[in-house]
Image (tube, grey):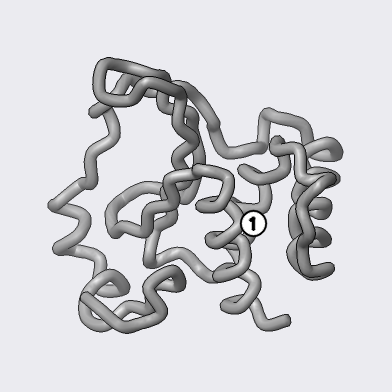
Amino acid sequence: MKEQELLEQLVNLARSLDFDVRFDCGSFQDGSCRLPQNDENPQDRNLVLLNRASSTVKKVATLSRALGDQPLEGIFLLPAVREAIERERRNSLHIGNENRPAERDFPAGEIEPDSTARESNSNCSGNIHHPSRGGQHG
C-alpha cells in the first residue's frame, strides 16, 4: 500500500473513532492531544494536528501513534493499517516516552494556528492534497 493510501485509511479510521483530524500550516510539529470537556464540548475530544508541510511518512507515524492507544481488536483493519499502528506501538515501547512527541491536555481554545508561519512556509501555499476531501485546495 502506498504511503498516501495508508494516510487516507488512518485518517478515516481516526475520524470513525471520533478523533478530530486537522491539516494545517504553521511552525509546529505533527502531534496529538486530548481536549478536555467544557461548556461547548460535553465530552473529551482527541485531536490530531498534522502539518501540511510534513512528509506523508511522518503524518502516518503520528496518526498511527495516536491510534495505538485505542482498543482496535474488534475493528476490521487492512493489514497495512494494522501493521503501521503496531509498529508505532512497538517503537514507543522501545524508545520510551522521552523521545515521543508530547501528548497532553489543552484547555479549549489554547491551540491556534500561527498565521505568520503560514505566510512564510512555502510548502503550505498553493494546491495541497487533503486526504479526507480527496481534492486539491490551497
Q: Judge whether 46 appears above or below 19 on screen.
A: above
Identify which residue is drawn at 14% across, 63% down.
Answer: 119
How many marks do you count on the picture? Answer: 1
The reply, left or right, for residue 123 in relation to residue 84 is: left
Image-quadrant location for residue 96: top right
Q: Is mark 1 on a helix, strand or loop?
A: helix
Image-quadrant location for residue 83: bottom right
Residue 120 vs residue 55, the one in the foreground: 55
Position in image of residue 21 (x %, y %): 44, 51
Q: Judge whether 55 appears above or below 45 on screen.
A: below
Identify which residue is drawn at 54% across, 60% down.
Answer: 11
* Kind of residue sitting beneath label 1: Ala
Where is the N terminus found, in terms of image quarters?
Answer: bottom right
Q: Judge whether 17 appears above or below 69 on screen.
A: below
Position in image of residue 130 (x %, y %): 38, 72
Identify which residue is drawn at 41% across, 79% down.
Answer: 134
Residue 79 vs residue 97, the one in the foreground: 79
The reply, left or right, for residue 27 in relation to residue 16 is: left
Mark 1 surroundings: few (<14), some (14-19) or many (≥20) residues within 10 A: some
The reply, left or right, for residue 46 in relation to residue 128 is: right
Q: Name the residue under label 1.
A: 61
Position in image of residue 76 (x %, y %): 78, 59
Identify which residue is drawn at 14% across, 51% down.
Answer: 115
Q: Judge whether 135 appears above or below 120 on screen.
A: below
Position in image of residue 78 (x %, y %): 78, 68
Residue 14 vs residue 111, the one in the foreground: 14
Where is the C terminus found, in terms of image quarters?
Answer: bottom left
Residue 68 vs residue 103, the one in the foreground: 68
